[in-house]
Image (cartoon, rainbow, N blue to C red):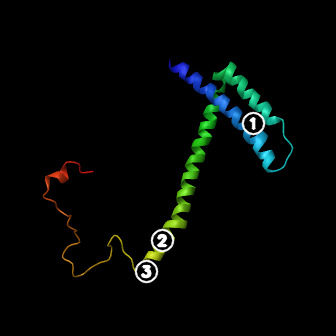
Amino acid sequence: MASDRATSELRKFGLVMAAAIAVVFGLALPWLFARPWPAWPFVLAAVFVAFGLVAPRALGPVQRLWMKLGQALGWFNSRLVLSLVFVVVVVPLGLVMRLAGKDPVSRRRDPNAASYRVASAASDDPQSMEKPF
């Protein structure tokens, strides 16, 4: 049963790759950049379709390589995107709040304070514990 699932996944991989290669490299990019229609994307797509339909297990190494490439790009992109969000959004927001004198998490020292503990709003109502969230 697991091998049937693997075979069907590899078949889907072959067909999806064929469609993506034909659409992106054979149609979209030449149309966007006003280039002549190349033949190689359709030949490569036909190879993927043939292997996907006739011998999907032969696509196993290609799929593993594709997944490793996807993982590497995902690792890089997540760090790049998160870094950009931090530098473009969080740092300027923090600087503006600091210049405006805002301190939303009360980090300033108060030498006269006996404690920094903030008491929660206690409720004696038993209904408040029925659905706490």
Q: Earlier in the sequence, mark 1 or mark 3?
A: 1
Badge 1 crowding class, 10 Å Cα cut-off, few under 14, some 14 to 19, many 20 or more, is many
Q: Furthest-right residue in view?
A: 36
- Residue drawn at the location 75% of the way across and 27% of the way down: 47
CA gap, disc 1 and disc 2: 44 Å
Determine the secondary structure under disc 2: helix
Q: Which residue is mark 3?
A: 100
Callout 1: SS = helix
- Please indicate whether residue 7 sits to the left or right of residue 133 in the image: right
Q: CA distance from mark 3 to mark 2?
A: 10 Å
Specify the quadrant of the image occupied by residue 84: bottom right
Label located before the other in sequence (3 or 2): 2
Residue plotted at (17% across, 62% down): 122
From the top left corner, tell me how far across and down residue 55 is, in percent: 67, 20
Q: Which amino acid, by three-letter code, is at mark 1? A: Ala
In the image: residue 67, left or right of residue 92: right
Judging by the rendered image, the residue that carries numbered circle 1 is 22
Q: Residue 63 got which mark?
A: none
**Do the CB atoms of the residues marked 1 and 3 lie less than 8 Å apart?**
no
Q: Amino acid at mark 2?
A: Leu
Camera-side residue of 20 and 114: 20
Counting from the top left corner in percent of width and height, residue 127 is at: 17, 51
The quarter holding residue 114 reads bottom left
The label on residue 93 is 2
